Amino acid sequence: MSTPLTMQDWQTKAQQLEINGRAFIDGKYQWAAEGQTFDCISPIDGQVLAKVASCTDTDARHAVSNCRQAFESGVWAKQSPVRRKQVMIRFAQLLEQHAQTLALLETLDMGKPIRDSLAVDVASAARALRWSGEAIDKIYDEIAPTADNEIGMITREPIGVVVAIVPWNFPLLMACWKLGPALAAGNSVVLKPSEKSPLTAIYMAQLAIEAGIPAGVLNVLPGFGHTVGKALALHMDVDTLVFTGSTKIAKQLMIYAGESNMKRVWLEAGGKSPHIIFNDAPDLKAAAAAAASAIAFNQGEVCTAGSRLLVESGVRHQVIELIKAEFAAWQPGHPLDPNTTSGALVDKQHLQSVLKFIEVGKEEGASLVCGGEQQLAATGGMYVAPTLFSDVSNKMRIAQEEIFGPVLSVISFDGMEEAIAIANDSIYGLAAGVWTADLSKAHKTAKRLRTGMVWINHYDGGDMTAPFGGYKQSGNGRDKSLHAFDKYTEIKATWIAL
Ligand code: NAD
Ligand code: MN
């Protein structure tokens, strides 16, 4: 093992970094056809990192037709699963070999702590590619239970051209949750990263080629949602659109699909996840630590953030005091300092939106317990202290709307029925946490929560082996696990008369 890098080392690396801002089509980096660019700004200090290609519908058409050609040629889709597996594993290894550069790009671009970029984003992204690759030569097709004079074969085929539109909070990881199963299953993919965090997607494209993914099978188009994103979503020759991002845009994408070719649309959208602490929680200190981490990790820019903390009234006072203490470990710091736990919010616009929500909470009559302020403003960066509101009612905007920052609302309740009613009173249904030592109560509550994920006596667990996604307006379909392959394959029934 090499010794961990210091902040000075990371800063030196950042100065030496040559940042590539071009699109990637047919195995080659290129500027947008119409020549536009936009400035990629670091939220660490507000400085311009690079000029990035601002792709338009011209690039969308070019990239989709190139993906179509690659798909129809069979150069990837008709490779044996074992061959595709080997390439995907090589792709994962290359991510690991380039981990420092990818982590540095991620941190500079969107402000998260470098230690998370390395240990969470890049590591989990590589795992997603490897796991999906390893799975693909172990998935069998089916034979239907038919009469003796016929055979019914049920086979899965790659679906064709997939467009993946991803957000900025875990840019590389959200991309790889899609690319892993999409590529392993034999599809060709156009990846559209967020305009707020395009750099790792661009960098990764060359690694795909180096791993052995043929040119045209993975194209990357940086640019804005309302330009290149919309053009891709409306394109008549895209078979499937997979998305992670806000509920607002998710709904728009369903409209685009209906207005164009009825491409399949799979959505991972927003959340306002309830985190329930009952009076009989087995370990209140652990629950408070989990509650703090659930809202402060990644600056609260997490779709599964435990942003509504439902606390039973008997332990309310104690839990609030414990969380205040836990927040000391989550004060913002320089993202390139390896000791930093909480970095910068993604950009100025988002900083202002989070600060606005804090004002809204005060106006609605919630009690501000701690935080609530911008931090480190002299650096030019976008930092907010972890913020705790108590006396929140679930009707308030800060309890209903996704803030996507380090702002936690404490709502108190009495008894399981009230906890479940408040928890389910949301347009979202992504995740939930439950703390109780009562096994029966834990299971009863988990069953009645209308969410895609439930964590009992911890928060935010997960692995490639289990599906990720939500109920209600948090989306449809699932990332991760074998269920993810449903999004990237069509099912064919073939009947043979004997
Ligand atoms: P966003 O919806 O604003 O943008 C997501 C992507 O959509 C970006 O690439 C953007 O350019 C693109 N886009 C925007 N308008 C478009 C349009 N008209 N047509 C096509 N594409 C368009 O979301 P964001 O701010 O980047 O990300 C934050 C959101 O993502 C939060 O709501 C969060 O909860 C959600 N999220 C969900 C999950 C999950 O798995 N459920 C994971 C991470 C983030
Ligand atoms: Mn950025």
Image: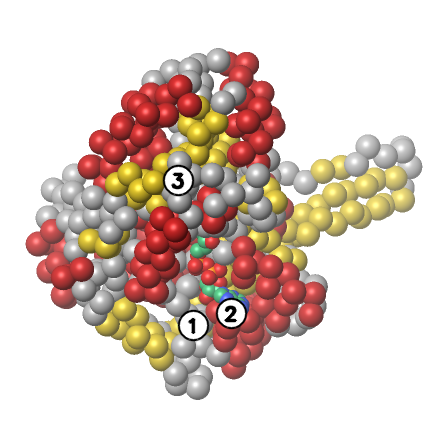
**Residue 88 point in image, percent of width and height:** 44, 50
Question: Is disc 1's CB within 8 Å of ligand 1?
Answer: yes
Q: Are marks 1 and 2 in contact (CB under 8 Å)?
A: yes
Q: What x and y, as percent, mark residue 415?
A: 52, 20
Front-most of residues 455 and 176 = 455
Residue 397 in view in this figure: yes
The amino acid type of the residue labelled 1 equals: Gly
Circle 3: residue type: Ser
Amino acid bearing label 2: Gly
Mark seen at residue 238: none
Instruction: Select label 3 or label 1 by which is in front.
Output: 3
In this picture, is 157 found above or below 378? above
The response on whether ligand 1 sits within 8 Å of label 2 is yes
Classify mark 3: helix, strand or loop.
strand
Neighbour tally class for label 1: few under 14, some 14-19, many 20 plus, Cα within 10 Å: many
Residue 374: horizontal and vertical position, in percent?
23, 55
- Circle 3 residue: 409
| Residue beneath disc 1 | 223
- Residue 101 seen in this snapshot: no
